[in-house]
Amino acid sequence: MKRPSRKAERVWWEQGHRLVAGIDEVGRGAYAGPVTAAAVILPERCRLGAVRDSKMLDGLSRESASMLIKQQAVAIGLGWASPIEVDQYGLTEAVLRAGQRALADLRSPYDAVLLDGNHNYLKEFARSRSIIKADQSSLCVAAASVIAKVARDNYMQRLALMYPEFGFDSHKGYGAPAHWAALNLLGLSPQHRRRWRPLAGFQDAGLRIQIVD
């Protein structure tokens, strides 16, 4: 498994931009729950050899990597876009909002930004660059993917306590067989994305909205 490097960050460093924020988000393809983005600024020297794209790590490895990142990062920010926002504005806008909120939550200056993917939704910020599979190649983006994944998974575990019928702790809102079984039996919870095409035709389960602290 190839380690993510500092190569993309170094391009900015060599131009005098020392504080480079990596951004990644999770929850794009989920049927329920928020889109969650993280922004991470790492020091130029750090020991994060265990950090990989979150999809390449199991749960325990992600938790361990998240702790290492939090111990060494210059700054970490989280941003969320709710299922209601996904329905109302669409996924692209929800990802933008989550990413912007993650940058704001850094509460730290940043000089440049690296994003995962082929769409730079921060293109109005001149020192931003999107890289396909940056979560695998760039350490700060890989770190952001880990922070976002752990945060969202923890959130979905709390949702599972509020809506135990749906088993959000096991499938995290994605289209697993257990999730489909619950949908067919119960219908939609307040945490589902009602305009998501796979959910068309499902009825509302009539459960009240509960707020996660």
Image: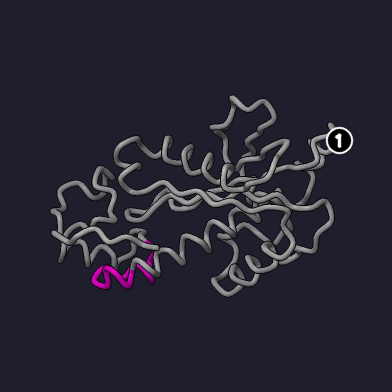
Whether residue 165 appears in magenta in the rendering, the answer is yes
Horizontal side of residue 72 vs 30, given as left or right: right
Quarter of the image for the C terminus: give it: bottom left
Judged left or right of residue 122, residue 32 is left
The magenta segment is 160-172
Three-letter amino acid code at the position of disc 1: Glu
Residue located at (28% from left, 65% from top): 179
Residue, x 82% and y 51% (percent of image)? Answer: 44
71 shown above or below 193? below
Q: Is residue 134 above or below residue 73?
A: above
User: Element type at marker 1?
Assistant: loop
Direction from residue 26 to residue 145 in the image, left or right: right
Colour scheme of the rendered structure? one colour
**From the viewer's perspective, is residue 96 above or below residue 23?**
above
* Viewer-side residue, 19 vs 149: 19
Residue 166: image quadrant is bottom left
Residue 108 drawn at (x, y percent): 68, 45
Residue located 65% across and 69% down the image? 67
The residue that label 1 is drawn on is 14
Q: Is residue 33 above or below residue 92?
A: below
